[in-house]
Image: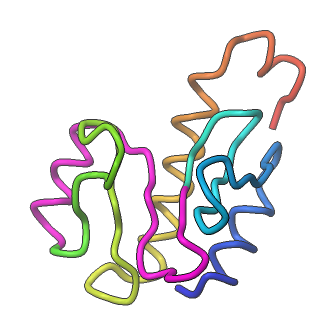
Amino acid sequence: MTLEEIYLFCSAKNGVSEHFPFDTKTLVFKVYGKMFALIDVDTPDSINLKCNPERAQALREQYSAVRPGFHMNHKHWNTVLLNQDVDNHLIKELIDHSYELVYSGLPKKVKDANPR
């Protein structure tokens, strides 16, 4: 997937905002204020995504392009190298999974005020 494809896919989700909280090149997508995806806009060769710990480990064993999250909690985040052995369909599925995990962890009052 290209940076533009990822940008359009993430931005289209309900409650998503984009930020550069760390530097001028790391684009962070948040759902109602909580991170679910990070990508380097200068060198968009990977994306960091939140993942269920058991699934994260299984994906790392199955795909050489899925690694523990770079500069993230390795139990809950994966770095997925783009344009390698993970196809675009699975990358979109992993973006959806990350978004859903983060959304489901939001406080009830935030979810009640912002249903999907």
Is 108 covered by the magenta stretch?
A: no
Q: Position of residue 86 (x, y in %)?
A: 32, 79
Vertical placement of residue 55 versus 81, above or below: above
**Count of numbered badges drawn on the protein:** 0
From the viewer's perspective, is residue 86 above or below residue 13? below
Locate residue 62: give its quadrant: bottom left
x and y, in percent, of residue 98 in the image: 51, 47
Q: In x, y percent, where is residue 43?
A: 50, 83
Answer left or right for 84 relative to 59: right
The residue at 86%/28% (across/down) is 114
Q: Kindly indicate the quadrant of the structure image that contains residue 70.
A: bottom left
Left or right of 13 in this view: 42 = left
Residue ID at (61%, 68%): 25
Q: Is residue 39 magenta?
A: yes
Q: Tell me what residue is drawn at x 60 percent, y 41 percent.
A: 35
Near-viewer residue (20 or 44):
20
Which of the two residues, 26 or 108, is positioned nearer the viewer here?
26
Residue at 43% over, 45% down: 50
Asked if residue 86 lies left or right of residue 50, the reply is left
User: Where's the C terminus, which quadrant?
Assistant: top right
Q: Nearer the viewer, residue 52 or 6?
A: 6
Please say if 17 is above or below 11. above
Q: Where does the magenta region start and end?
A: 38-63
Q: How is the image coloured?
A: rainbow
Q: Position of residue 55 (x, y in %)?
A: 26, 46
Image quadrant where residue 106 sits: top right
